[in-house]
Amino acid sequence: MLDLKELGFRIYNSNRPAQVPYDRKKFIKVTYLWVHEWN
């Protein structure tokens, strides 16, 4: 079973353009929303 943070990170990375820098706050928000929407 994948760690939720790892899974969220993969989803976030797959949905962002390569030229956009990593945004930790946005990543946390996206992961938080993903966890609460799907679980």
Image: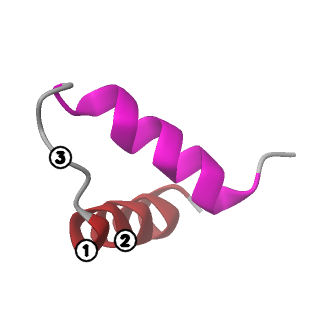
Residue drawn at (59%, 63%), measured in percent from left and top? 39
State the image coordinates of residue 5 (x, y, percent, origin top left): 60, 61
The structure residue drawn at horizontal position 44% and vertical position 38%, both measured from the top left corner, is 11
Q: Nearer the viewer, residue 32 or 23?
A: 23
Residue kind at label 1, given as amino acid type = Lys
The residue tagged with tag 2: helix, strand or loop?
A: helix
Q: Which one is closest to the eye, mark 3 or mark 2?
A: 3
Q: Which residues are magenta?
A: 3-17
Asked if marks 1 and 2 touch (Cβ < 8 Å), the reply is yes
Residue highlighted by disc 3: 21
Residue, disc 1: 25
Please provide percent x and percent y for residue 36.
Answer: 46, 70
> Rounded to the nearest whole Å, what is the CA distance between mark 3 and mark 2?
14 Å
Q: Which residue is mark 2?
A: 28
User: In the structure shown, which secondary structural element does the residue marked by tag 1 occupy?
Assistant: helix
For marks 3 and 2, the one nearer the N-term is 3
Position of 21 relative to 18 (above/below): below
Amino acid marked by disc 2? Ile
Determine contact: label 3, label 2, CB under 8 Å.
no
In magenta segment, residue 27:
no
Camera-nearest residue between 16 and 35? 16
- Judge whether 19 appears above or below 25 on screen: above
